[in-house]
């Protein structure tokens, strides 16, 4: 499953060169992952209320081209690896046909103490698997 969502670059997300500041891509990728979870039916707020969480353990980002104010960016997210406790989501950010960013994000499910835990059955959805 590939989830797509879009956003428009805002002026305050850009640096003195007029490019999106690299740190803002983390926010864009997080937005894309949240939309991915919604698309596959993963109720993240209910997951938190049930005493669980998802920690991001690793983010690998390759910056390909700059994005600028008012650019419309499309974030694509898809699962590429799934284990009992963790997984990897591949993400890309595009401006039209241009690839702006490629990323791989490793996540892990945790309990209320922040300890790794097998993803509970009710939230182990098929959309999390490649």
Image: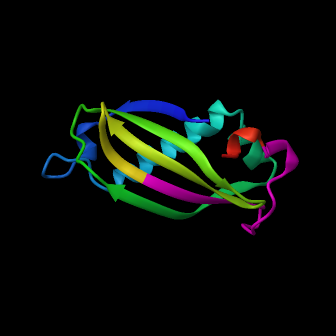
The location of residue 13, given as percent across then percent down, is 28, 45
The quadrant where residue 40 appears: top right
The location of residue 101, given as percent across then percent down, is 35, 49
| Protein image colouring | rainbow
The residue that appears at 19% across and 52% down in the rendered structure is 15
The residue that appears at 47% across and 38% down in the rendered structure is 76
Q: Is residue 70 above or below residue 77?
A: above
Residue furthest to the left: 17
In the image, 53 versus 65, the foreground residue is 65
The residue that appears at 61% across and 47% down in the rendered structure is 79
Work out which quarter of the rendered image holds the N terminus and state it.
top right
Residue furthest to the right: 121
- Queried whether the magenta region covers residue 86, the answer comes back as no
The location of residue 33, given as percent across then percent down, is 55, 43
The residue that appears at 79% across and 63% down in the rendered structure is 117
Q: Is residue 31 above or below residue 21?
A: above
The magenta stretch is: 103-124
The location of residue 21, given as percent across then percent down, is 27, 53
């Amino acid at each position: 499953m590939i989830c797509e969502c879009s956003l428009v670059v805002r002026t305050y997300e850009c640096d003195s060169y007029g490019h999106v500041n690299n740190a803002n891509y983390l926010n864009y990728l997080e937005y894309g992952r949240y939309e991915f979870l919604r698309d596959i039916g993963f109720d993240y707020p209910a997951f938190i209320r049930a005493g669980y969480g998802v920690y991001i353990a690793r983010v690998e980002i390759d910056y390909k081209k700059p994005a600028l104010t008012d650019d419309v960016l499309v974030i694509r997210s898809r699962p590429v690896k799934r284990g009992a406790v963790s997984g990897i989501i591949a993400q890309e950010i595009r401006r039209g046909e241009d690839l702006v960013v490629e990323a791989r994000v490793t996540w892990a499910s945790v309990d209320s103490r922040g300890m790794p835990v097998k993803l509970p059955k009710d939230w182990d959805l098929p959309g999390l698997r490649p």
